[in-house]
Amino acid sequence: MIKLVLIRHGQSAWNLENKFTGWTDVDLSPKGVEEAKAAGRLLKEKGYSFDVAYSSVLKRANRTMDLALEELGEGDIEKHYSWRLNERHYGALQGLNKAESAKKWGDEQVHIWRRSADVRPPALTKDDERWPGNQKEYLDLVKKGEMSEKDLPLTECLVDTAKRVKPYFDQEIAPAIKNGKRVLIAAHGNSLRALVMELEHLSAEEIVAVEIPTGKPLVYELDEKTLEVLDKYYL
């Protein structure tokens, strides 16, 4: 049996302002910083240690990973960053206040966009500055061959997010786990929900009810060979 630990990033500045964030690269709020540190202290108290950590390319997840590992005294372990672990892209909703969006489109429609697994929010157009194709960090990844232009979303549903998370887990993270490495993943509510879909073999209907709180380490006990889930719990 081997343990895999997932942490959703601490509260971000836009979580605090009740905005749709998605791929917007906002930082942690002061509360989020403390949540990340508290996660590290809790992991240390429970005797956890890690060989390798994985995160998205967004600073709120990166800082959560770094702050937690610093509390553990393991800030120098191997770290990997991938756009495939980014939060779900919220399309034209990104940057909008959730309450104001509900007034504009109706509570029910916004709830469907937020919680359904296979319904996308309104899409951006490619001339919108919020499209990743207009942002240097993603253009650089395209130039490096780490992603292609078709990978740059105009909008995403959770199923779309799962389609990019799954191959990264299968090709990069799962082999590390099977090789006995102790793995920490610090990512986002929806990219982690997509990973939960993979680990627990949940349907699009079943994942709707799953919510992952910020800054709370979620532990999966896995079979070392098959990576089948033996147990799961929050610390």
Image (cartoon, rainbow, N blue to C red):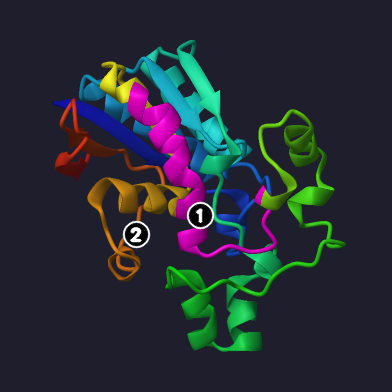
- Residue 124 colored in magenta in the image: no
Q: Secondary structure at mark 2?
A: loop
Task: Name above or below for residue 127 compared with residue 1.
Answer: below
Residue 162 vs 223, above or below: the answer is: below
Q: What's the amino acid at mark 2? A: Glu
Mark 2 or 1 closer to N-term? 1
The amino acid pointed to by label 1 is Thr
Say which residue appears at 43% left-offset and 71% top-offset.
115
Per the image, the residue denoted by label 1 is 161
Question: Which residues make up the magenta segment?
Answer: 151-175
| Image quadrant where one finds the N terminus | top left
Q: Quadrant of residue 203?
A: bottom left
Mark 1: secondary structure: helix
Instruction: Please name the residue shown 55% across and 32% down the image.
Output: 62
Q: Residues within 10 Å of mark 2 (few under 14, many from 20)?
A: few
Residue identified by numbered label 2: 211
Q: Residue furthest right?
A: 127
The disc at residue 67 is: none
Along the line of sight, which residue is nearer the eye, 21 or 170?
Answer: 170
